[in-house]
Image (cartoon, rainbow, N blue to C red):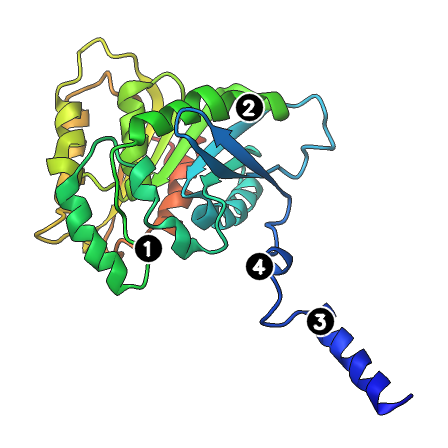
Amino acid sequence: MTRALLMCAALTMVIACGNENQSAADARVPILGSVSHQMPSRAVGDTFQVSVVLPRSYFADTTRHFPVVYLLDGNELIGVASSVAWELWVSGMPEVILVGIDYPVVDLDQSQGIRFRDLTPSEDRAAIAVQGPEYAALGLPAPTVSGGGPRFMTFLTDELGPRIDSLYRTDASNRSLLGLSLGGLLALHVLLERPDYYHNYIVLSPSLWWNKDETVARFSALPADRKPVQRLFVSIGLAEEDSIYRMVKNVRRLEEIVATQPSVALATRFQYFPDENHNSGWPAAMSRGLRFAFRLWPPTGQDK
């Protein structure tokens, strides 16, 4: 074999194995068991990346319908959720369909600015002005707009939910919504506006500071006859507290309000993590939230 042919063969092997010039589409590895959809939304006027992870026995038992867990910030959360759900199945949790909702981007950085548009229930220009430089300092796309939460909620409940129900064997009587940070804020907004759509709300480190703590205030004004949801789990790391965002204080306030509002939820759990901050506590909180939603937590079997 000539040197030219050897070089050509070597180059072919490099290309086949992948290199830094390989396209993102070729290099991305899907989560095991996942199906990817591009779903346009009339309500939002945008297209979303929807990743669906099917349970292990989905194709083995074609008559069975499964609970569905919808995850906001799906590009970030669904990989961890897929592993956690599998591990919890070993511990007795029912198998679930996971649905991650995010944007059709090539990396997690690109979702950070636009999520402010969809995960905030109201416009807060002051917050956008503060967050912009903070995100830019991290080299992340800065948020520019906010307040699209109501339109995004319409996408979740009126467009995405029915679409998932039509594509997969879902149990419409057992839907869960899981959100982290701004996603947790949006989940609480959905609970206030559409409490009957999801049956379990798993809220991790919610950004309750948004627009002068308005979501906390809305809970305190709930009518006494508000239809209850099935279960509500809220978590926070105690290292998340500071004088600007008051993350822990707001969760404690919410817990006090919910305790005096028995109509908010039939079962609630507020979980505080002593050694965790906003970035470190959510994987453990996700596990406990899923266990609470499916009645595997607390270990005593007694709800708070």
- Percent across and percent down for residue 132 are 22, 53
Q: Which amino acid does label 3 sit on?
A: Ile
Which sits earlier in the primary sequence, circle 4 or circle 2? Answer: 4
Out of 92 and 97, give the one closest to the viewer: 97
Which sits earlier in the primary sequence, circle 3 or circle 1? Answer: 3
Q: Which amino acid does label 1 sit on?
A: Pro
- Mark 2 touches mark 3? (CB < 8 Å): no
Per the image, label 4 sits on a secondary structure element best described as: helix
Per the image, label 2 sits on a secondary structure element best described as: helix
Residue 266 falls in image quadrant: top left
The residues tagged by marks 4 and 1 sit, at their Cα atoms, a distance apart of 19 Å
Write down the residue under mark 1: 141
Q: Is residue 46 visible?
A: yes
The residues tagged by marks 4 and 3 sit, at their Cα atoms, a distance apart of 14 Å
Residue 293 vertical position relative to residue 12 in the rendered view, above or below: above
* Residue 163, label in figure: 2
Residue 76 vertical position relative to residue 210 in the rendered view, above or below: below
Determine crowd level at label 1: few under 14, some 14-19, many 20+ residues with C-alpha closer than 10 A: some
Which sits earlier in the primary sequence, circle 4 or circle 1? Answer: 4
Find the residue positioned furthest to the front: 4
Q: Is residue 154 left or right of residue 212?
A: right
Write down the residue under mark 4: 24
Instruction: Name the mark nearer the viewer: 1 or 2.
Output: 1
Write down the residue under mark 3: 15
The residue located at (24%, 16%) in the rendering is: 263
The residues tagged by marks 2 and 3 sit, at their Cα atoms, a distance apart of 39 Å
Find the residue positioned furthest to the bottom: 3
